Image (tube, helix red, strand yellow):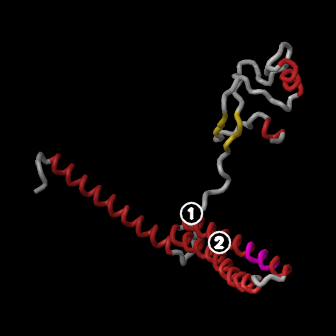
Amino acid sequence: MGTAERREAPEVARAQVTGHPDPGLIDRDDPVTAAGTAASGTGTRAGERTREAPGQSAYRPLWVEEPARRRRLPDPVRTAAVRAVLLIAVTLLQAMVAFLCTMAGSWLAFPMVISSVVSTIAATWGALDVWVTRQVWNQRHGVVSVPSSTARALRRERRLARRRARVAERAQGRIRRRGAAAGQLSHS
């Protein structure tokens, strides 16, 4: 663990500090603490400088969880990406085995080369699948806002349905108010 991880956590508004409150926790890279621990066998000694400011507790976080910079991939896109990574990893493994078998003069070299070629085609398909899945998801869920986007038509339909519901609700309210004003108990 480097020096950057040991420093105090930066003041991030949305960061969640996660750690273990242990007052006996010592920093072994601090020469004063390390010398005191080695000499006395304990984590404290008289005259030793402390890292905590006055009024602060001995709580020192192990790490600071910062908010993600980018949004998480949608589930179908993430599934396709995982599939593609696995296909590419298997392809690279097969290519390496094919190369080593060829260098060793093994009978397994030819079948491995053939399977590597097939695996390369599958890995290419997997990479294209990620791209196509991402485009389809964007098209369906309104991330892309171009005139040909089906998401725009879906938003328009939802907007019209909400508008119709509001108009019907207002009309119903007017009917109730008119009935109450005239002293009627029901509209019929």
Q: Earlier in the sequence, mark 1 or mark 2?
A: 1
In the rendered structure, the answer to whether residue 169 lies left or right of residue 14 reads left
Residue pictured at 58% horizontal, 73% vertical? 133
Asked if 27 appears above or below 105 in the picture, the reply is above
Given the image, on which type of amino acid does mark 1 rest? Pro
Determine if the magenta segment contains residue 50.
no
x then y, percent, for residue 17: 66, 37
Residue pictured at 21% horizontal, 49% vertical? 177
Residue with the mark numbered 2: 84
Marks counted in the figure total 2
x then y, percent, for residue 47: 86, 14
Q: Which mark is residue 74?
A: 1
Q: Residues within 10 Å of mark 1 (few under 14, many from 20)?
A: few
- The secondary element bearing badge 1 is classed as loop
Residue most toward the top?
46
Q: Nearer the viewer, residue 101 or 38?
A: 101
Asked if 94 appears above or below 74 in the picture, the reply is below
Q: Nearer the viewer, residue 61 or 29?
A: 29
Which mark is nearer the camera, 1 or 2?
Answer: 2
Cβ atoms at labels 1 and 2 below 8 Å apart: no
Quarter of the image with the N terminus in it: top right
* The magenta segment: 93-99
Given the image, on which type of amino acid does mark 2 rest? Ala
Q: Which mark is residue 149?
A: none
Splitting the image into 4 quarters, where does residue 66 fall?
top right
In the rendered structure, the answer to whether residue 48 lies left or right of residue 81 reads right
Q: Residues within 10 Å of mark 2 (few under 14, many from 20)?
A: many
x then y, percent, for residue 14: 64, 41
x then y, percent, for residue 175: 20, 54
Q: Nearer the viewer, residue 85 or 96?
A: 96
Splitting the image into 4 quarters, where does residue 188 fall?
bottom left
- The secondary element bearing badge 2 is classed as helix
